[in-house]
Image (tube, rainbow, N blue to C red):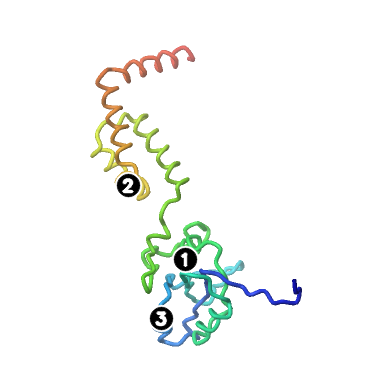
Amino acid sequence: MNENKKVVEKGRDWTFLIYPESAPKNWREILDETHMRWVESPLHDKDTNADGEIKKAHWHILLSSDGPVTLQAVEKIIKPLNSPTPKKVGSSKGLVRYMAHLDNPEKYQYPVDEIIGHNGADVASYFELSMTNKLSLMKDIVKYIFDEQIDNYADFLMIAIETSDDWFNIAINHNTLAINKMIDAVWQKKKSGAFDIKDERKNKDQQKML
């Protein structure tokens, strides 16, 4: 193997910054003409340095391709934008979440609804729950239904709306049948008096402890 051979950096997802003061006015049109999917962050004009000084206003951009593209190719694309060197993205979902600082509560929180997808980029897909997160949320939901003895699906949906968008998403898009069965099982237990027996035992145990 030739040790002097230059390694060509490739990736499907790349990120770079756009500065309003140096980018051409038609920078969005320039990116649109690539026909590649790209995502635009809200204008970050409230970021600060460690000393509290306001950083130069900028947009974070995610540029995505169906297949790997080289660093040199991306540099050629963004050259008219006067942007700093692009960087390969390890997690496109993580980057899009960073556009609003969702996982950085110490930083200014930008509106998620100001994240814009271009050329067919589906912003909502970057916020979809992973299987691990879905399972964890479902455990919380099942436990809540049991502990609070929820026996009506309509009541639970209203609770889900008030709790979080993730709960409501799980309830109507992913585990509707399982949640309905759980609620029905709670209704059956209440009808048979099983919860009353459980509560009586709990009260007796608490009295013994006192």
Q: Nearer the viewer, residue 120 or 49?
A: 120
Secondary-structure class at tag 3: helix
The numbered dot on residue 99 is: 1
Q: Quadrant of the N terminus?
A: bottom right
Residue type of the residue flagged with mark 3: Arg
The numbered dot on residue 67 is: none
Is the residue marked by circle 1 packed among few (<14), some (14-19), or many (20+) residues within 10 Å?
many
Q: Earlier in the sequence, mark 1 or mark 2?
A: 1
Up/down of 141 relative to 107, above or below: above
- Residue 173 lies, in percent from the top left, at 31, 48
> In which image quadrant can residue 160 be found?
top left
Is mark 2 in CB contact (under 8 Å) with mark 3?
A: no
Is the residue marked by circle 2 packed among few (<14), some (14-19), or many (20+) residues within 10 Å?
some
Secondary-structure class at tag 1: loop
Residue that appears at 55% across and 67% down:
89
Q: Nearer the viewer, residue 196 or 138?
A: 138
The reply, left or right, for residue 171 in relation to residue 23 is left
Kindly report the distance in space between the C-alpha atoms of the residues bearing marks 1 and 2. Answer: 24 Å
Residue that mark 3 sits on: 28
The numbered dot on residue 168 is: 2
Residue type of the residue flagged with mark 1: Met
Q: Earlier in the sequence, mark 2 or mark 3?
A: 3
Up/down of 62 relative to 186, above or below: below
Kindly report the distance in space between the C-alpha atoms of the residues bearing marks 2 and 3. Answer: 35 Å
The reply, left or right, for residue 27 in relation to residue 163 is right
- Residue 164 lies, in percent from the top left, at 36, 48
The reply, left or right, for residue 108 in relation to residue 49 is left
Residue that appears at 33% across and 36% down:
178
Q: Earlier in the sequence, mark 3 or mark 1?
A: 3
Secondary-structure class at tag 2: helix
Residue that appears at 43% across and 65% down:
110
